[in-house]
Image: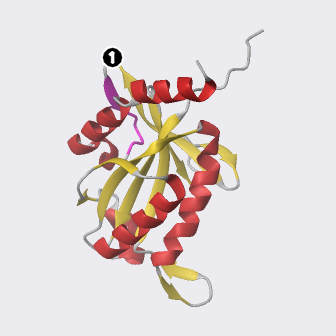
Amino acid sequence: MARVQKPPQGRLIVGVIHSSLDALADSLKALERRFGRVQCETTGAECADGDFYREEMGADLQRRFFSFERPVSRESLVEIKGICHKIEPLFADRTGEDFYFRTVNIDPGILTPSNLVVASHREQSHRVYLANGVYAETVLIFSRGQFCRLPWTSPDYYADEAIDFFLRVRGTFGELQRLDSAAIGV
């Protein structure tokens, strides 16, 4: 019988789609208050999924990726998605009782040495339900020395700058292992 093992921690990654630089800056401050300092980031790039969000968020959407210094447990993805979901309306334009036109869309994920798993509230055939309306989707796997996309991976996640970013963050896992060892007294 296999022993149940707790996997090592990963790095929190957020992809932020934004229609306003001010909203991006404000949402990033809220994310840092909750998750700690940003470790790495990308520059803005056109959002490949912009047509999907156009009616709600407007045209000319950009996406940026951020990683955070503080490691996170993999089982925290549901909680993290909930926190991000609560941050989005803080920078939205409210219409009516319960509908918001978002200026930021925050998609969290956890990067490990072997993959990037992101959280979503939308069900799809390739997503696994976790809890509280949150689904997990593996968008990249690390194989043969490189990140590889999957059939459903959004082009934003495998653009050259994004891949360079994920490789930089992956390169911090030696540091992360030293932090884990220090925390448990090894």
**Which residue bears the numbered disc 1?**
144
**Residue under the point 56% across and 48% down:** 124
Please state the horizontal and vertical placement of residue 116, each as a whole percent of the image: 45, 37
Q: Is residue 113 above or below residue 121?
A: above
**47 and 28: which is toward the camera:** 28
Q: Amino acid at mark 1?
A: Arg
Image-quadrant location for residue 165: top left
**71 and 98: which is toward the camera:** 71
The furthest residue to the bottom: 96
Q: Is residue 22 above or below residue 119?
A: below
Residue 131 falls left or right of residue 170: right
**Residue under the point 37% across and 31% down:** 172
Q: Which residues are magenta?
A: 146-153
Please state the horizontal and vertical placement of residue 135, each as a whole percent of the image: 60, 48
Please state the horizontal and vertical placement of residue 32, each as a whole percent of the image: 45, 58
Image-quadrant location for residue 49: bottom left
